[in-house]
Amino acid sequence: MQQTTNESDTSIEKTTSDLIFQLINGLRTRPVEYLDRFDNLLTDLKNTKKTNAVIKSFTSFIEEFKSKPSRSFQKSGILNQLAAEVSEKLDMFNDESYLRTLIAENYSGVTFLASHFVYNEETDSDKIVNDILMSELIRKDFFLSNSFKLIGIHHRISEEDPKKSTSVILIADEINEGSEHTFAERIVNEINKFRMLPSSYISILENYKTRILKEFTKTKKEIAEELGYFINSMRRRASIRNFTEIVLNESLSAAASEHLDLLEQNNNRKFFTQDEEYLSVMLSHYISGFSECREFIATEIFQPKNIILDFLVNERDPSKQARRALISPNYSHVGIAHRIIKGTRVTVIIFTDKAESAQPLTFEEGLIHEINRIRAYPKSYVKYFQSIIDNNEMARNSTKKQQETFIKNVWGMIEFLQNAKSLAPLTIHYELNTAAEAKVNKFMSEGKVSATSDEKLREFLGDYGTGFYDVAQLDDSGSTDPLEFLKDVLIPRNANKNYRNLIFSRYFNYIGVAGSPERVYDDFVDQVETKEKVTIMLLTDNFENLTEKFDTSVISRQIVLKRPNLTNDEILQIKSDFKLFDVTNSGYVKPGPLLFFMDKSAGFSKLNFIYYEAFKHLNTEENNSNGVNVEEFINAIKKILFFVYQDNRWKDLYEIYYGDNRKKIIDYDVLKRITTELKYKITDEDLLVVLERLNENSSLDLAKFTEIMKIVENLGRIN
């Protein structure tokens, strides 16, 4: 029964399309046969009390129509197909913009085009044709012009209500398969046209200015005034100074397409642009040699000329960054990608000053790029991890339980990525790379990577730098591809090596990476011995070049910054105190209001110095918006304790010169030698002042000595 109904609907649709075609051609070629129709339409106009101007216009059309028969339309298969495609999208696109974009991207030869849309209404062939006759905008094109030769009609009955239907009627002079230019190429042509001849946009800008002035608001008046200044500047320019032709770059377009992937995976409908820092990280995977980059997004715009207009006048861009990019001679390359996302046409455009081919990266460089990329754009990796499940990448010899656990972990990672926040990229530090290489060399000699506690790792890193507290070591064996390494550490087969929280920690800012060669030469047996590749990654919150390595004649051993770990009792006490701060019992507190309370409470900051300083450290815009949990509070306390204990670094030096049975005075030569070995650049005049303060009290205690040496340290950094 259902099939019979569908066949009946299809027959009615075809019949209606044929009736519309016959009626339009009859009106074009034999107008005198339809005079009764015109009389009825004119009577309807008068009865509905239309203005005299409307009635006069229709009367004039009738007189011209009767005296000027036109050629009949020829059916066009391409236009029929196009009409069917447009009818499917009329719920989202109810004007010609989408139609013209489709034609520009897929067809050629069209010079003249007109259309009539009827969306989901109770209608028949007579009413549809009457609507065209009553439209001042299109009736002359449909019934008087001989420039139009082809017609395409699609009539579709609504599945929800058979009484309603959707119709699309297209007429054109000519249409051929295949586009002469892609949408991206047309945008580039329009950009170059504007850069070469800015004055060509003056009339468009003047019309826009006139339109917004009609809104009579103070804001619109200010926008119009600013636009007026810009229009005048355009009049004075023959072309953009030092005009450089913008070139469409395939690699940049691939980067723009990647951002569309990210926008498509975004849970809300916010189409955001990337700032220069994150954009440069993404672009470094596609191109090299650039120093300037800028990205813009246009939504619901189908014509290249309108995109340029949007760039020039966009009220959501108060600093006019898009306009500046258009007129800047610095940009010479562009990448463009566009897509329909959640019913919205989205176009991503990326400008750069240069776009050289991306240089091949070493494994270590590629790995750092991938780490920074997943931190900055976590959602962009969702498809990659979905492909792991689709391709069944679990080892074949794994048990069924292991496979189920692995798949569960992958889905957990996908869910994590969909909700993860964007993080700043990690900075490569040469000394951290050196430290990682040392650990790899140890593996080469011992054949294994030993686990290490945070305290031991701090002590190890003390040979290479200073100023850090939060540290972490990640290692993996066997991976020879950066993406494989990332997969292995984020979805480990070993439960003891779950590094997800480390890679996505906002406490880490510096990174060092080293990897062993895949093949190692064995001197003893004079042959190549194959060993599994191992990669070691080191992360720290801060890292400064070591300035505290003293000659053994000055200090008996190298100073390593240490701080006792919090005991279990201390952690329990902190968690208990955190609950007192968490008055809403949400598990999160906001530092700003708490600091305000502490400042108003007499003596709180002195009696609870560590807590007070920890909340000051956490008092950021992001934390006051999202709140901080107890783990973040504990980490902040650890950092404050670390800085408090840094004062102990001068203890060794004090013991050498001021401890029991030691000389109580430092002379100029000794102090000069100490500051030189610390690499502090201090003038002789400042050194004499410090020396005087050191020796003014023969019983100098550690606290006073530390205070004076901090002066030395600060003077050295300033100079």
Image (spheres, rainbow, N blue to C red):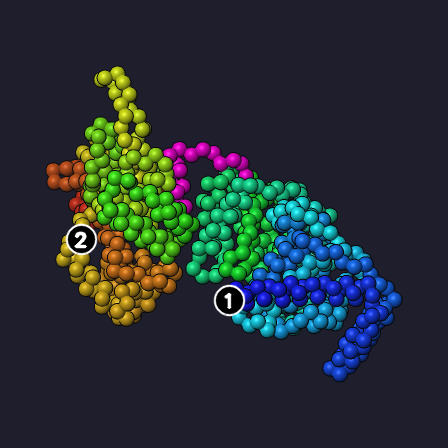
* Residue 262 seen in the current view: yes
**Front-most of residues 610 and 128:** 128
Between the C-alphas of marks 1 and 2, the distance is 74 Å
What amino acid is found at the position of numbered circle 1 in the picture? Gln
Furthest residue in direction left, as rendered = 661
120 above or below 154? below
Is any part of residue 112 visible from this angle? no
Q: Nearer the viewer, mark 1 or mark 2?
A: 1
Q: What SS does tag 2 mark?
A: loop
Q: Residue at x 49, y 36 (%)?
A: 358
Q: Is residue 76 left or right of residue 546?
A: right
Q: Is residue 369 magenta?
A: yes
Residue 609 screen position, x and y as percent: 24, 60
The residue that mark 2 highlights is 566
In the figure, 700 relative to 577: above or below?
Answer: above
Name the residue: 34% across, 34% down.
480
Instruction: Give left or right: position of 40 versus 205.
Output: right
| Residue 70 vs residue 261, the one in the foreground | 70
Q: Quadrant of residue 315?
A: bottom right
How many discs mark residues in the rendered view? 2
Q: What label sits on residue 104 in the rendered view? A: none
Span of residues in magenta: 355-375
Q: Quadrant of the C terminus?
A: top left
Instruction: Return the residue at label 1.
Output: 2
Q: Going by the picture, which residue comes out furthest to the right? A: 67
Q: Nearer the viewer, residue 125 or 442?
A: 125
